[in-house]
Image (cartoon, grey):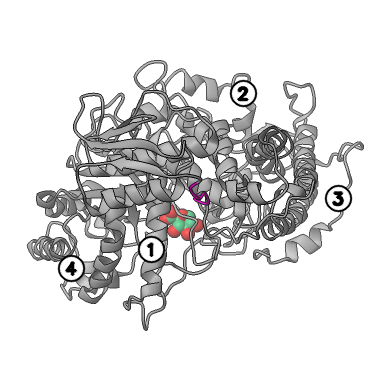
Amino acid sequence: MALSLHAENGHNLWLRSKSTGSVKIICSKSSVTLNIAKQELKNSWQGKSGATIELLVKSDPLIKGDGFKINSGKIQANTELGILYGVYELLRHQQTGQSINNEVSNPSYERRILDHWDNLNGTIERGYAGLSIFWHNEKDSFTVTEKDKILWQEYARANASIGINGAVLNNVNASPQMLSSECLKKVKAIADVLRPFGIRTYLSVNFASPAVLGGLKTSDPLDVEVIKWWETKVKEIYSLIPDFGGFLVKANSEGQPGPQDFGRTHADGANMMADALKPFGGIVMWRAFVYSQKEKDRAMQAYSEFMPLDGKFRNNVIIQVKNGPVDFQPREPFSPLFGAMKKTSVMPELQITQEYLGQSIHMVFLATMWEEFLQSDTYQEGIGSTVARCTDGSIFQQKYTAIAGVANIGLDTNWCGHPFAQANWYAFGRLTWNDRLKSEQIADEWLKLTFKPTAQENKTETTVLPIEWNHNFLIPVKQMMLESREAAVNYMMPLGLHHIFAGNNHYGPGPWYAPKGLRPDWTPPYYHQADTNGIGFDRTQTGSNAVSQYREPLNSKFNDVKTCPEIYLLWFHHLPWNYQMKRGRSLWAEMCYHYENGLKQVREFQKVWDKVQPYVDPERFNLVQNKLRKQCINAQEWKDGCLLYFQQFSGLPIPYDIERPVNDLNDLENRNFSKE
Ligand code: GCU
């Protein structure tokens, strides 16, 4: 078979298809958003040539918010944006070969937001795909070029195609300058480009802005001048951006200022901002990512600090909680705050950028991790109180529902660095729209949209039959994606291990990393607690008692080593090296096999990829091949580093049917694991 596929640089993401025929559109209205919808239909129509499609903006009791009703001849929605979403759904069905029945599709979350950790100087905190698409550098950060606008429009279109409707434009470690009048003018320019695609603009704000930017003596949230300052600032913002979404706030966390600096609570701080935003319909997303040196267990602090405040927040405040209690690790149990705060709105925060999952080098499909999280049962309101249902309004009557993902987007031509990292942006969007979607379906759709030879290519070159493509490309590559996260857990942190990264950059292994004088909770030994007696963090009732933050039956289940799921074993228990695992091996041996298997899995991924070469254009093929090689090297470093380091405590041999380490511990300890 000799397909000669066009080189693709990945810039078109999952939106590569061109129309194969004409379509007649009936639509009695016209607007910027509806015009985009019509244009998309014309440009990408893959249905019967000459078919008619009606776009109808008319409310229907079955349609909620920006949802839509769709069949092969008609799209109906309450709003114009709903029509646009319906169009993308119809085109996706055509391109992925799914039939269209009469269906109603409503979004799971009302606010579906990307958080950009972009700094005004153009760098991106934890960004691995180039510089910011919004900010260039301090000097000309506020200028706007035509090139910028085209890129923002492409960005907005990609987001709209998967249901994302909000963007926080700057880092949670926010510069007070963000709220300067000069900067807000640029925010307006961005908001104007995003608006027709239904994307609302939000900003991260620095709690000390009144003092630092406004020159006030204090930023105390109960001070009259401070309250006035925020009211005036909010008015200024809405005069420029009438549909402004609201603020995201990281307060009293990792050195950021906050209400506690003035003896006030998170609720005092959040409510003051919420009151200023309320007349304009704005919201406050107040982060629960807090921890301090004083707490005996970092995993417990968010719950300890926020639970006493349940019910004390205004109804336009949403507490934004990271999926796990620590920090976006390869695997964590869900944060116990989900479902527990019953009188306060809560929204999940996911991390799309792979800070702790191989950055833009490793191929790790995150949908499986998010599915595991969203479907975790909190038991808070009986069986079936999944995190998804506790946050999407199914169980609690929240005034607003929302979900956020930390973006993995930068100026790289392919947006995300790794071609497969695009799948994580795609998966996030699809899950925000439908939090019950299965990872398998998401991977299937994304692969078809991103890699299937386009109709034009298939016409002019030797034809690839769909059945052949499915069998030789889709099935093996999908399988690889679905296994990829578990592989990463295996070669990085199996059995509930967490946060054993090399310092600061969070790419390579560093279970040994503990420079003198550094806060213990910033060093891996705090988390793995390895010594000659064993390994793991004791969070049982006789340990830190973090288990008590979970509702029964989870509290007892996690507390008892016999019932604690093995995937969370060392998260909740400190166990001897010779502890007998369910499979009959010792804990030490089991750990060794996990590391070995993780590495083997990535070696297999290389074979899968090499085999699909005939079906992928050379540009994307080579890039992925090259990244998989680097991933293997790093997986080997993880395995060798962790096994050789922990072996110093276990004193046991690495089982002899396991491949021997190829790196010396000393060399690894002295390496600076910056990416690439
Ligand atoms: C992690 C990350 C930081 C980030 C922080 C946050 O700790 O490493 O870069 O600022 O999360 O979410 O606020």
Camera sees residue 526: no
Cα separation, mark 1 vs mark 4, equals: 37 Å
- The residue mark sitting in front, 2 or 1, is 1
Q: Which residue is mark 2?
A: 561
Look at the numbered disc 2 and say if its residue's Cβ is closer than 8 Å to ligand 1: no
The residue carrying pointer 4 sits among few (fewer than 14), some (14 to 19) or many (20 or more) residues within 10 Å by Cα, namely: some
Cα separation, mark 3 vs mark 4, equals: 57 Å
Q: Would you say 6 lies left or right of 304 here?
A: right
State the residue at coordinates (89%, 47%): 660
Magenta range is: 15-19
Which mark identifies residue 218? 4
The residue carrying pointer 2 sits among few (fewer than 14), some (14 to 19) or many (20 or more) residues within 10 Å by Cα, namely: some
Residue 217 place in picture, x, y as percent: 16, 72
Q: Would you say 370 lies left or right of 28 here?
A: right
Camera sees residue 343: yes
Which mark identifies residue 152? 1
Residue 586's quadrant in the figure? Answer: top right
Q: Amino acid at mark 2?
A: Val
Main SS, magenta region, reads loop
Cα separation, mark 2 vs mark 1, equals: 51 Å
The residue carrying pointer 1 sits among few (fewer than 14), some (14 to 19) or many (20 or more) residues within 10 Å by Cα, namely: some
